[in-house]
Image (cartoon, rainbow, N blue to C red):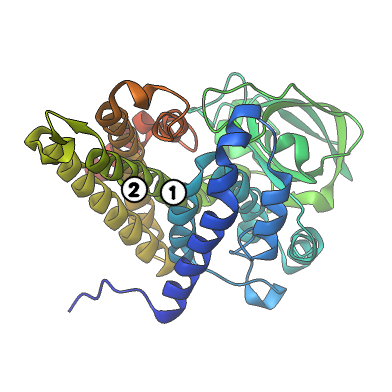
Amino acid sequence: MIDFSLTDEQLALKDMVRKFVQAEIIPNAHRYDATGEFPHEIIRKAWENGLMNPAVPEKFGGLGFGITEDVIMNEELGAGCLGMTTSIAVNTLGLYPILIGGTDEQIKHWVTPFLNEPKLASFCLTEPGAGSDAGSLSCHAKDEGSHFVLNGSKMWITNAGHAELFTVFATTNKELRSKGTVCLVVPAKSPGVSLGKHEDKMGQRCSDTRAITFDNVKVPKENMIGQIGDGFKIALKTLDKTRTPIAAGAVGAARAAMEYAIKYSKERKQFNQPISNFQGIQFMLADMATKIEAGRLLCYQAAWALDKGQMKVGSYYASLAKRFSADMAMEVATDAVQIYGGYGYTKEYPVEKIMRDVKLVQIYEGTSQIQRVVIARHLLED
């Protein structure tokens, strides 16, 4: 018989993160959104509560959490502020390539320091000319024997202005496309590394997003994760693990939008009664709840498969979860704004921020259109 219940430990984790969100994130979300300031203090407190690097295995001193625990955390974080969720969760994205493809020595050297203090890492895949087509990288790593010389640029890199290190994907031979890629760990303060401006975004405004330029950056061979040709595979395996928690963040944001809409519909009166009495509003709320539950179940199904090591089916369900939950959250947030009416379109109320924030989930870590490509490819395989 299928058991949909969480373990006692998972329920305790959910409760802990929810309390953290209520105490630290929700009271500060509006201010950080308004200023675009990076939430250093929230990041520090998230690290103190064990929310920053949950995937680091126990043998290296970490919590050893699976994707399911990551989903639990991200749904709760997403209900508070998706911008802060991204700032917190992207650390796992930045470190996963090392955890997936690195040796024990590399993990100890590069990852364990993140357990000792609230350091940040960034995942550097997207380029100005290579977004969805990640196999067409232009950032070039020239093999010079004992080291690589890295030249090129990366775009839309989260936490770039505050990261200690970058996991960078580059090509050693562009003609080989994905087969010529390499994954390199590049300390942020390496000579030749320069940062672009902080992007002034529509939503998720407190998450730091920048371009990075590499100008003749020397990267020792011992900083290579895996071998030449492994980079693209490491990137895909990383995204397989992080897409589902990203989807869970969207579920959390949608849940918050629905909860705000329910509360408002009970308080707002028209025609001498709460608007929640009207069937039109009731149907909107019912559709919200149905979509949110469906998104959550897809996230848990993907997490379950990935935690069981069923990587092929897990990747498929991760794309299903990401595609559905991202689009679903946008629909729910839009309907929440509609229920608020004119008030919902102002910054005085929280639903307009949610609407701006969830839009980005349809774009980053694989657009909704690319997820459809992945899903269709799986369905049409012989």
Q: Residue at x 58, y 19 (%)?
A: 129
Q: Quadrant of the N terminus?
A: bottom left
Residue 382 shows in the view: no
Q: Secondary structure at mark 1?
A: helix
Is residue 14 rendered to the left or right of residue 161? left
Is residue 317 rendered to the left or right of residue 124? left
Label annotation for residue 79: 1
Q: Residue at x 68, y 56 (%)?
A: 98
Q: Picture coordinates of residue 137 (x, y %)?
A: 62, 27
Q: Amino acid at mark 2?
A: Arg
Q: Are marks 2 and 1 in contact (CB under 8 Å)?
A: yes
Q: Picture coordinates of residue 83 (x, y %)?
A: 55, 39
Residue 214: quadrant of the picture = top right
Q: Residue at x 43, y 23 (%)?
A: 346
Q: Amino acid at mark 1?
A: Ala
Q: Picture coordinates of residue 376 (x, y %)?
A: 26, 38
Label annotation for residue 255: 2
